Amino acid sequence: MRILGIIPARKGSKGVPGKNIYPIAGKPLIGYTIDTAVRSSVLANIVISTDDEAIWEYAAGYNVTIHKRDAALATDTSPVVLTILEVIHFAEQKFNTQYDAVMLLQATAPLRELWHLEEAIALLETHNDYDCLISVVKTGDNHPARMYTIDDGILHSLQPENEDLNRQQLPPVYLRNGSIYITRRNALLENKKVMLKPALAYIMDEKYYLNIDGPKDLMLAKIIMEGHGNRP
């Protein structure tokens, strides 16, 4: 498969402004995702889409292509799929090629290894009937059986049938960890969606779950990356 790797990285963020370039263990956050992507032999091309000049300058030291994202596609409410669609068109024109699939790698989920990319692509290649693959991790104590909605101050269980079960009895539930999304090109262009149903599950170990959204997540990232040799 000829796969286009896309790393979207907006400048703005309500939770942590400039978080994609925030230094963690001596490297900008986005650097961990770029490092893994460029070491991979499974990505035909890698495009970083950003409106952040600091990221343009940092990424210039890598064998990647920069897509300078328009401000209209870099707001808090801009659907990421619009950027993905634009990057596909941009890359196919630039490299005079047509890709088979797109791999979306989010900079805010830095805990992934080279072999994760290879395994995920191999899994999709062996399942021709599926157009989408999403990486997930098994939930721990944050199980839906422990979750509720509240209506007029009253708790309503999301899984009342499992509410009284102990942890060992609960059916396994999986959470998107934001690390890897792969979608076949034609299906993505047709549906204008990255996540298509049915989607293949690529199960990663729970230790690879780190999705940086706010200041607390950045503190946790520093502990993990600095305390464990930059890797779990």
Image: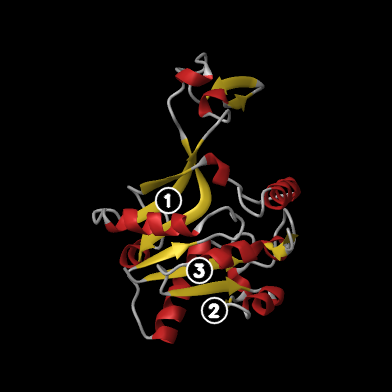
Q: Residue at x 71, y 60 (%)?
A: 19
Residue 6 seen = no
Comparing 98 with 115, the one in front is 115
Quarter of the view holding residue 119: bottom left
* Kind of residue sitting beneath label 1: Ile
Q: Which mark is residue 17?
A: none
Q: Which residue is mark 1?
A: 134
* Kind of residue sitting beneath label 3: Arg
In the image, residue 172 sits, relative to residue 211, either above or below, namely: above
How dense is the environment of label 2, judged by Cα within 10 Å: few (below 14), some, or many (20 and up)?
A: some
Q: Residue 14, position in %: x, y? A: 72, 56
Quarter of the view holding residue 3: bottom left
Earlier in the chain: of badge 2 and badge 1, it is 2
In the image, residue 171 sits, relative to residue 221, either above or below, namely: above
3D distance between C-alphas at marks 1 and 3? 21 Å
Earlier in the chain: of badge 1 and badge 3, it is 3
Q: Residue 156, position in %: x, y? A: 56, 21
Comparing 7 with 147, the one in front is 7
3D distance between C-alphas at marks 2 and 3? 10 Å
Earlier in the chain: of badge 2 and badge 3, it is 3
Q: Which residue is mark 3?
A: 39
Q: Which mark is residue 63?
A: 2
3D distance between C-alphas at marks 2 and 1? 26 Å
Residue 150 relative to residue 46: left or right: right
* Kind of residue sitting beneath label 2: Asn
Q: Residue 167, position in %: x, y? A: 52, 20
Q: Residue at x 32, y 62 (%)?
A: 187
**In which quadrant will I find the N terminus?**
bottom left
